[in-house]
Image (spheres, rainbow, N blue to C red):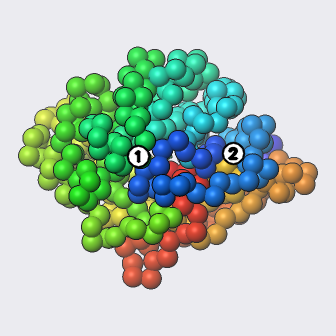
Amino acid sequence: MTRLELADRYGRVATDLRVSLTDRCNLRCAYCMPAEGLPWLPSATVLTDDEVCRLIAIAVGSLGVREVRFTGGEPLLRPGLEEIVRATAALGVEVSLTTNGIGLAQRAVGLRDAGLHRVNVSLDTIRPDRFVEIARRDRHAAVISGLAAARDAGLHPVKVNTVLLRDINHDEAADLLAFCLDHGYELRFIEQMPLDPMHSWDRERMVTATEILDQLRQRWTLTAEERVGGAPAQTWLIDGGPHKVGVIASVTEPFCASCNRTRLTADGQVRNCLFAMTESDLRNPMRAGASDDDLARRWQRAMSIKAAGHGVDQVDFKQPARAMSAIGG
Ligand code: SAM
C-alpha cells in the first residue's frame, strides 16, 4: 500500500481518528438532542462492520493514523462493536471509546479482551435527579456502574467527560472532581460548543474554563502541566499531584493550531474538523468499487483543505448542519 499522510496547508498532520459508529443514542441530553430524538441516518447509508474496518485499515496502513477512538451517537448501541474493536486493535494502534456508559457494566471485560485500551465516560452530574433533568432518562445508576466496571476491567485511565450548563449543573465542578478522585477516575471538563441541533448555544451563558477553574481552586491547589502534542485538554495537578484534572477550552482557548484529528461519520463521510461545513464521501466510492489507494487519496484530499481554525468565537461563525451526535464527539 502507498504510504501517505493526512497533512494540511498549515503543517498539521492528523494521526488521531475518531470513528462514529452510529448517530443513535439511548439518552436525550438536553444540550445535544431534542426530547423526541433526531431523524436517524437511513440504515442503508450506515457503513457495515466490514466497511468500517476496511476504512480504518486504510487510515492506519496507508495514512499514518496511530490512534482510533470510537464514538457516536452511542457506540455501545452498535452490535458489532467488539468485533470492530478487535479488528482495529489487531492493526497495532491505540484503541479507545467515548460512551455514556450505559451497558458498559456488562461489556467492559469483553471490550478489554477484544483489545480496547481506554474509555471516556460522559457524566455531567453526580446527582440522580439532575441526571434525569439533563439526560431525560433515569439511567444514572447504570452509568455509575459502567464506570466502576471499566475501572475494574483495567481500562486505565478511566476518564470522565463533563459539560457544565448554566443554571443546571454549573455549580457542580468541585463535587464532580471529588467524586472522580474518590473513585480513581480522571475528570475532563469540556466547554459547551455550538453543535446542538436546537441552536440553543449561547456564548454569554456558556460556562467557561476560567469559571470552572475558579470553582475548583476553592477546594484544591491546581498546578498547570505542560501541554503535549495535539492534546486538547490543559491538565492540572491537584494539590501537587499525582492526580489531575483536565479542562478542554474548545471555545475560549481553541487548540486548532495543534489539532491532529480526522473524523469518519457513521455514514462514511470524512470530516476534517468538528465544525467543518463540508464533508468528503468515502461510502459511495467504496461501494462503487474504489481501490484502497483511491480511498486513501480521497481521504488525504479531504484533510488537505482543513481550515486554520474553527472560528467559533468570531462574529461570522456558522454552525455546521450536522449535529454533534451525528458527527461523533
Ligand atoms: N454517547 C457518547 C457519550 O455520551 O460520550 C458519545 C457521543 S457524545 C456526542 C460525546 C461527548 O460529546 C459527550 O461527552 C457529550 O457530553 C459531549 N457533547 C455533546 N454535545 C456537546 C456540545 N455541544 N459541546 C460540548 N460537548 C458536547
Kindly identify the residue that appears in the image at 55 percent across and 45 percent down.
25
218 displayed left or right of 63: left
Dot 2 corresponds to which residue?
59
Identify the amino acid type marked 2. Ala
Q: Position of residue 83 (x, y in %)?
A: 69, 27
Which residue is at the front of the view, 328 or 59? 328
Mark number displayed over residue 135: 1
Kindly identify the residue that appears in the image at 69 percent across and 54 percent down.
41
Q: Position of residue 54 (x, y in %)?
A: 77, 40
Q: Position of residue 55 (x, y in %)?
A: 74, 44
Kindly identify the residue that appears in the image at 40 percent across and 62 percent down.
193
Mark number displayed over residue 263: none
88 displayed left or right of 153: right
- The mark nearer the N terminus, 2 or 1, is 2
Outermost residue to the left: 218
Outermost residue to the bottom: 316
